[in-house]
């Protein structure tokens, strides 16, 4: 992409409830508007099927790490040309909810994405972003957008200390700011007072039939201080098995070529999954 095309456009909205600072290139604003047109007609009674259909329209989109780490302050980053695993899930959920709620404007997308990405739906600095995915699930459950069904499908509660971001402060430029650092510590303290429910890797095969297409899958990890390393969307393919639709670190949005259970065996640090069902 030419340098001039990469220049971002900061859009300021005064409408109550919208993020005040939005980072969006003209090309990405156009991409959002085109995506709204592309997904028209994909709504089904089963929201999960809608989510998979919308997700598959992103197949082939390049994987780009740290897509939200831009600028000198936290803004609502809109980027459909490069996705990491979390922004893929967020964008697919946002467009699917727009279909469900019959919303068709760019401003509707802004409002929906902000609600999903930030604590209690409000952008209020770097620490308001839901950085830890277990908190992302918990907070979006509180908003009524999804339900953590891990326990219902055989998951067990575990206790794990979460402190990866504060313990590796040097990896996060925004944490040079002491206020951001203390707020992230507060989020970690909150998570450390909560139990995390995990469906262990060895139990997934026996409970795979309880996972639905469109469920959000979060891969839990043995890495110290971290809850989740990757996320994607469950899709039951022609073989009758659950596969993972995700922004893969190997390069782009794909559907795993093997069922989820086999895919997870390739991830040495994987301990299991959390499963959240959009409502």
Image: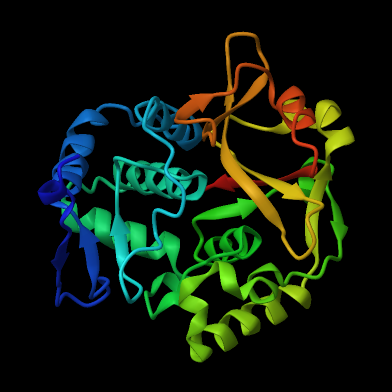
Residue at position x 42%, y 43% in the image: 64
Position above or below: 177 against 12: below
> In the figure, is residue 46 to the left or right of 191?
left
**Dividing the picture into quarters, in which one does residue 165 lie?**
bottom right
* Image location (x, y in percent) of residue 114: 35, 64
> In the shown orientation, is residue 117 left or right of residue 169?
left
* Residue 259, position as x, y percentages in the image: 69, 20
Q: Give the tally of numbered discs.
A: 0
Q: Residue at x 74, y 69 (%)?
A: 162
Q: Is residue 200 above or below residue 261?
A: below
Q: What x and y, as percent, mark residue 141?
A: 57, 61
| Residue 39, placed above or below residue 182 | above
Q: Is 197 in front, or is 67?
A: 67
Type of colouring: rainbow
Q: Horizontally, is 153 left or right of 62 in the view?
A: right
| Above/below status of 108 relative to 152 | below
Residue 270 coordinates in the image, percent (x, y): 78, 42
Residue 78 image-quadrant placement: bottom left
- Is residue 181 shown left or right of residue 65? right
Residue at point 81%, 44% (across, down): 199
Quadrant (top left/top right/bottom left/bottom right) for the N terminus: top left
């Amino acid at each position: 992409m030419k340098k001039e095309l990469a220049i971002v456009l900061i859009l300021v909205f005064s409408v109550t409830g919208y993020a005040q600072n939005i980072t969006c290139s003209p090309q990405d604003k156009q991409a959002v508007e085109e995506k709204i047109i592309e997904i028209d007609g994909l709504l089904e009674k089963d929201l999960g099927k809608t989510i998979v259909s919308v997700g598959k329209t992103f197949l082939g989109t390049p994987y780009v790490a740290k897509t939200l780490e831009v600028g000198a302050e936290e803004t609502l980053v809109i980027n459909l040309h490069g996705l990491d695993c979390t922004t893929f899930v967020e964008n697919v959920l946002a467009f699917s909810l727009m279909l469900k709620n019959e919303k068709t404007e760019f401003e509707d997308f802004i409002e929906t994405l902000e609600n999903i990405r930030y604590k209690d739906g409000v952008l209020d600095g770097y620490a308001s972003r839901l950085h830890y995915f277990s908190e992302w699930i918990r907070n979006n459950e509180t908003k009524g957008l999804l339900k953590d069904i891990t326990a219902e499908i055989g998951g067990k509660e575990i206790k794990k200390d979460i402190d990866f971001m504060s313990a590796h402060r040097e990896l996060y430029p925004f944490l040079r700011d002491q206020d951001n650092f203390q707020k992230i510590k507060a989020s970690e303290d909150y998570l450390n007072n909560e139990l995390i429910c995990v469906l262990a890797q060895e139990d997934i095969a026996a409970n795979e039939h309880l996972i639905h297409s469109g469920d959000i899958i979060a891969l839990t990890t043995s890495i110290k201080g971290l809850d989740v390393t990757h996320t994607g969307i469950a899709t039951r393919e022609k073989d009758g098995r659950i596969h993972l639709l995700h922004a893969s670190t190997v390069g782009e949005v794909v559907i795993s070529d093997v069922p989820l259970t086999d895919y997870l065996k390739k991830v040495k640090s994987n301990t299991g999954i959390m499963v959240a069902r959009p409502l």
